[in-house]
Every structure is written in structure tokens, then in C-alpha cells.
């Protein structure tokens, strides 16, 4: 039996890992052992019950997995690759050129942060594990990059075992792709489409500030569809985000506060910086210092600018008018720890953009410790906050949060701008599905909180009449 097994992003919105295991085939004296591959290999984040699964071995030994097909460079899709490598993976990781470039900075940074967190817990004896260990090190993350191979959109790659694939633009972030996989099963050719994260159907009114090109192209015809449901129960606001963002910033500056923006280091940070620059040029907000506090900040900007082939016309126009953010007066990129500490030494209004986007690690934690207790400050969320993350706790109105074992009071103004989302909402997902040339034999909903996944399942069945199931962790689904 050929099957897909959901090893992550099933019952939750992180940890994407989908194992395809094809049936061994025997023809006369020749035999085919079948093929084992992973679509995505991401970190679990959020609730402890899910985070602990980062330390769990896969049901198939790492050395038996022959390939990883990576949809994009967010940690919940790529962040477990160094651990897979550490456990014995010797195959190839296939990704688009931009995704390969981004993983080259994201994965070593993830290893560095995990080593840093382990060292902190060992210093303060704040972990139940003695000694606390990183899931993988920065060196291991750098070593695993040798397994990566860049594949352009549309190019078909033959993997062996009668399995092939190609990348289709997903329009979620720079380099993001859907994986269209073709395989032989019981004498039939089957096409599977794994969406990764699906970008928004693009226009200026519904997705202001979007960086990459239009939403996913239509007309797909998979036999098996595995699709995300992050915003499967939500409708994005349609209002232009710029006036609201400007008003929030002006109000915080007027009362002498700073604006702290937890942001994903890749693309979301670059998008936000360009929008801040526009607001300053239009004199909608005052010219206060802007800090991008992330070790990978400079590298991410350079990679961002090197892949203009994926940009919207609006993004190309911004770059043409303003050039690289690295050269803008008043914009500062903190690469080192001392530079980061200098930001917190400032008590004047500033805008601080820092990762991790869900406030679960990285330098944003230090800024929150300092700025959360002061009611003059503004904490501005511009990205999805998964259940169980510190960002979700703050966004949902927690009066206090624990950071580095310290109880921190939440007195700052907390706001969230949903227009920044790069995930298609339920209306946009249905719009995309309507374009399909045929109804899939099987549709599996993944990568969403339970209520979101269930809402999308019900809506697809109601509007399209498809048979749909919501994937469960470790569940195997036979490929028809």
C-alpha cells in the first residue's frame, strides 16, 4: 500500500512533515524497494505537548528517507531538517532557489538560538534537563545545507522509484511553492498536490503591501490534495492597513512610547520596513529611529533584493525609489549582541522590529521584558500567532507572561493588524479550489488549528460537494 502519513501540522499549525511511502514493486527478477520522501520538515512550535514532539524520532529511520521536498523557508516547514540530518539523513533536500538562499541563513540562526537558549537554561538551572541540550547546533545546521539542491519553478525532477515532482508558485513568501508529485500506484499514475502555505489572491485592496506576485495560479488537477487551513475559519479585513498603522504609531510616539513589532525575519520584516519608509516619506509618521534587530537581518535584506523576479510591480517600484533599506538614514540593523543591547539602552521613542515572530525565542524576548510593563509602549503584531505561543498569550490579553523564567507584567498597548497576513483566508481558498479542472479523489486538510481545519472542511463540502477529511497526527492515508 502506498500512503501519506501526517507526521506534523495535523491538529496544529506547525511542524509540517508529510511522509510519502510508495509500495515496493517486483517485476520478474527485478524489484523496486519503493520510495520514501518527506514533504516539508518543520519545527513544532506553540503548546508544550507539540514542542516535545521535536525530540521524537520519526516512524521511519532518517537514513531510509531518500529526499525532502521543501515548500518554503519558514521554520514550521524547514526547521527540523538539521535534526533529520543529525539523525542520519543523507538524501537531497529540494527547494526553489530563493528558498535555498533563505534556508542558508534561517537554519544556522535557528541552531544558534537553540544553543543560546540551552546555555541560558544551564547557567540559571531553569530546565528540568541537566544539562539542557539544543535540538541541533549552528554547526549541524550549516552542515545540512550541503544536502540542498535548487530547483526552478516548473522544472520536473525524477526522483526514482517512479516518483517525480515539480514546483508551482504558491505566492506565500519569497520562494514559496506547492509541490506537485507524480507517482505510480497499483499500475496507475497519481498526482498529489501539497500546498505548503497558500498566498493571498492578490490585489491592492485585500492584500496591501504584499511583496511577491499574485496568488496561486488556478487550473490544478490533482488526484490527492493536501492543503493548509491556517485561516480556514477567518475573513481578512479589506481595509487599507496604512492609515490604521500610522495612527497607532503616531499615538504611541505622542505619549513617549516605543513600538515593538515581533516579526518573522524573512519577508515580513522587509515588507514592514518598506511600509514604514513610505509612511515617513508621506509625513504620516514622525522620522524616529527604526531598528531591525535580527542576526540575519542584513543577509535577509540582500537575499530579498536578489530575487526581484518574484516581486509585485509595487514592490519593484518601492525598491526603485528608495533603494536598499541598508542605506536608509535612521534605519539601523543590529547584527551583534552589543548592537542589540544598545537598542534597549535608548529610552526615546523608536520602532523595533525583531524576531521571533511568535515571541518564542530570539531577541524579541529581551525587548518585551523591557517594554511590556510600560503603558506608553505599543506591541504591534503583524503575523499569525499560533495557539500556545507567547505571542498568542499577549495578543489574547494575558495580564502577564513568563520570559526566561521571569514574570513580566503586560501594561503596554497591544494591537494586531490582520491585513499583513500572507495566508489566503477561507474565501480566497474556496476561490482557488473552484478553479480546479477536476475534483480530487481525496482531499486532506492540514496545517491549521482544529477549529480552523474543521471550518474549512465543512465549507468545501458545502460549497463544492467534495469529500474532505481533516488529517490527524501520525495518521496514514492510502493513496488511491
Image (cartoon, rainbow, N blue to C red):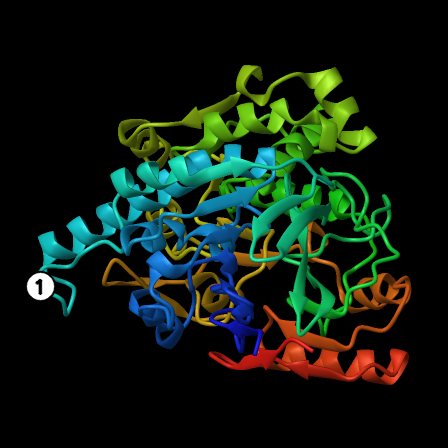
Which residue appears at 35% of the width and 55% of the height? 84
**Quadrant (top left, top right, bottom left, bottom right) of the N terminus:** bottom right
In-image side of 456 versus 401 (left or right): right
- Residue 112 lies, in percent from the top left, at 29, 41
- The correct choice, above or below, for 39 with respect to 260 in the image is below
- The correct choice, above or below, for 115 with respect to 428 in the image is above
Name the foreground residue: 419 vs 444: 444
Q: Is residue 282 visible?
A: no
- Displayed quadrant of residue 347: top left
Which residue appears at 50% of the width and 59% of the height? 37
In-image side of 88 versus 124 (left or right): right
Which residue appears at 49% of the width and 41% of the height? 258
What is the number of callouts on the image?
1
Q: Residues within 10 Å of mark 1 (few under 14, many from 20)?
A: few
Name the foreground residue: 79 vs 337: 79
Which residue appears at 47% of the width and 25% of the height? 298
In-image side of 337 versus 94 (left or right): left
- Residue 390 lies, in percent from the top left, at 42, 63
- Displayed quadrant of residue 310: top right
- Residue 141 lies, in percent from the top left, at 33, 42
- The correct choice, above or below, for 6 with respect to 347 in the image is below
Q: Residue furthest front?
A: 29
- The correct choice, above or below, for 23 with respect to 138 in the image is below
Q: Which residue is mark 1?
A: 130
**Quadrant (top left, top right, bottom left, bottom right) of the C terminus:** bottom right
- Displayed quadrant of residue 429: bottom right
Name the foreground residue: 230 vs 414: 230
Q: Is residue 402 visible?
A: yes
- Residue 164 lies, in percent from the top left, at 64, 52
Label 1, secondary structure: give it: loop
Amino acid at each position: 500500500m502506498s500512503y501519506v502519513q501526517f507526521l506534523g501540522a495535523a491538529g496544529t499549525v506547525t511542524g509540517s512533515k508529510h511522509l510519502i511511502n510508495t509500495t515496493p514493486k517486483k517485476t520478474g527478477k527485478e524489484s523496486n524497494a519503493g520510495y520514501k520522501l518527506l514533504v516539508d520538515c518543520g519545527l513544532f512550535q506553540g503548546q508544550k505537548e507539540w514542542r516535545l514532539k521535536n525530540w521524537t524520532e520519526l516512524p521511519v529511520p532518517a537514513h531510509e528517507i531518500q529526499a525532502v521536498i521543501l515548500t518554503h523557508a519558514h521554520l514550521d516547514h524547514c526547521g527540523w531538517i538539521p535534526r533529520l540530518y543529525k539523525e542520519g539523513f543523507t538524501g537531497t533536500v529540494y527547494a526553489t532557489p530563493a528558498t535555498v538562499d533563505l534556508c542558508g541563513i534561517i537554519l544556522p540562526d535557528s541552531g544558534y538560538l537553540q544553543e543560546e537558549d540551552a546555555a541560558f537554561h544551564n547557567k540559571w538551572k531553569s530546565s528540568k534537563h541537566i544539562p539542557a541540550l539544543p535540538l541541533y547546533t549552528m554547526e549541524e545546521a550549516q552542515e545540512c545545507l550541503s544536502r540542498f539542491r535548487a530547483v526552478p519553478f516548473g522544472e520536473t525532477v525524477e526522483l526514482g522509484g517512479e516518483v517525480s515532482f515539480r514546483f508551482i508558485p504558491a505566492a506565500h513568501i519569497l520562494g514559496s511553492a506547492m509541490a506537485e508529485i507524480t507517482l505510480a500506484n497499483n499500475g496507475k499514475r497519481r498526482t498529489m498536490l501539497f500546498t505548503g502555505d497558500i498566498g493571498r489572491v492578490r490585489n491592492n485592496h485585500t492584500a496591501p503591501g504584499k511583496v511577491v506576485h499574485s496568488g496561486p495560479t488556478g487550473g490544478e488537477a490533482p488526484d490527492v490534495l493536501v492543503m493548509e487551513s491556517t485561516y480556514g475559519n477567518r475573513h481578512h479585513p479589506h481595509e487599507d492597513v496604512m492609515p490604521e498603522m500610522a495612527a497607532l504609531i503616531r499615538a504611541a510616539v505622542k505619549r513617549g512610547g516605543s513600538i515593538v513589532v515581533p516579526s518573522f525575519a524573512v519577508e515580513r520584516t522587509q515588507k514592514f520596513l518598506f511600509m514604514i519608509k513610505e509612511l515617513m516619506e508621506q509625513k504620516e509618521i514622525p522620522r524616529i529611529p527604526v531598528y531591525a534587530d535580527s542576526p540575519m537581518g542584513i543577509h535577509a535584506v540582500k537575499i530579498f533584493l536578489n530575487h526581484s523576479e518574484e516581486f509585485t510591480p509595487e514592490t519593484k517600484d518601492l525598491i526603485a525609489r528608495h533603494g536598499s533599506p541598508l542605506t536608509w538614514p535612521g534605519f539601523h540593523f543590529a547584527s551583534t549582541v552589543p548592537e542589540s543591547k544598545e537598542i534597549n539602552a535608548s529610552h526615546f521613542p523608536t520602532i523595533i522590529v525583531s524576531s521571533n515572530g511568535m515571541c518564542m525565542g530570539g531577541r524579541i524576548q529581551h525587548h518585551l521584558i523591557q517594554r511590556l510593563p510600560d503603558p506608553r509602549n505599543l506591541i504591534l503584531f503583524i503575523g499569525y500567532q499560533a495557539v500556545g505561543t507567547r505571542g498568542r498569550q499577549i495578543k489574547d490579553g494575558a495580564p502577564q507572561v513568563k520570559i526566561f523564567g521571569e514574570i513580566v507584567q503586560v501594561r503596554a498597548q497591544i494591537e494586531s493588524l490582520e491585513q499583513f497576513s500572507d495566508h489566503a483566508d477561507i474565501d480566497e481558498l474556496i476561490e482557488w479550489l473552484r478553479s480546479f479542472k477536476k475534483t480530487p479523489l481525496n482531499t486532506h486538510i492540514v496545517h491549521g488549528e482544529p477549529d480552523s481545519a474543521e471550518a474549512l472542511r465543512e465549507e468545501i463540502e458545502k460549497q463544492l460537494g467534495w469529500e474532505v477529511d481533516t488529517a490527524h497526527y501520525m495518521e496514514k492515508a492510502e493513496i488511491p
